[in-house]
Image (tube, rainbow, N blue to C red):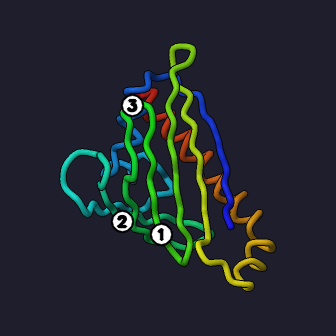
Amino acid sequence: MEQTTTLTQHIQAAPEKVWSVITDIPGSAATLSGVEAVQLLTDGPYGEGTRWKETRKMFGRSETVEMWVDQVDPPRSTTVKAVQGGADYSTRFNLAPRDGGTDLTVTFGAEVAKPTAASRIMMALFGKMGLAATRKAFAKDLAEIAAKAESL
């Protein structure tokens, strides 16, 4: 049982500048208003295996999730994963040069590995509402990433 959503933001900055913003994990709390705190769990530059805990405010409450970089192809794409509450989350960022700037596309997917009857009912009832809130949060993140990259 999977749900996905995709959004794209055109940014008036080169892909390398956008890449530097989306891969600046320690600085993400300063860039993204939805991120309250970040705790790095690994040392070194951004790359496959980089892990951190991110605290975000969602649905009116703070939630901390451990995340990791699953795939990286600088400065074209990266995939970040997380597991929480029986669901696997995947967020893929794709950067494509266009008109002197960058199209940044984020694709977010949530998959419940072993859905129970109760989780199927909950997804049917609240899945669209949760996906709408997720889209709204990602739209805000994209606008804030654009503002930061355009200011570099």
Identified at 50% across, 41% down, the residue is 93
The residue to which callout 1 is attached is 83
Mark 3 packing: few (<14 Cα in 10 Å), some, or many (20+)? some
The residue to which callout 2 is attached is 53
Report which quarter residue 20 is drawn in: top left
Up-down relation of residue 34 to residue 65 (above or below) = above
Residue 152: in sight, yes or no? no
In the image, farthest residue toward the top: 100
Mark 2 packing: few (<14 Cα in 10 Å), some, or many (20+)? some
Return the x and y of residue 9 as percentages of the image width and height: 60, 33
Of pointers 3 and 1, the one earlier in the residue sequence: 3
Camera-nearest residue between 36 and 142: 142
Q: Is residue 119 left or right of residue 13?
A: right
Q: CA distance from mark 2 to mark 3?
A: 23 Å
CB atoms of marks 2 and 1 within 8 Å: no
| Three-letter amino acid code of the residue under disc 2 | Lys
Identified at 68% across, 60% down, the residue is 3
| Three-letter amino acid code of the residue under disc 1 | Val
The residue to which callout 3 is attached is 75
Residue 59: in sight, yes or no? yes
Up-down relation of residue 77 to residue 2 (above or below) = above
Q: CA distance from mark 2 to mark 1?
A: 12 Å
Mark 1 packing: few (<14 Cα in 10 Å), some, or many (20+)? some
Of pointers 2 and 1, the one earlier in the residue sequence: 2
Q: The C terminus is located in which quarter? A: top left
Frontmost of labels 2 and 1 is 1
| Three-letter amino acid code of the residue under disc 3 | Pro
Return the x and y of residue 116 as percentages of the image width and height: 68, 83
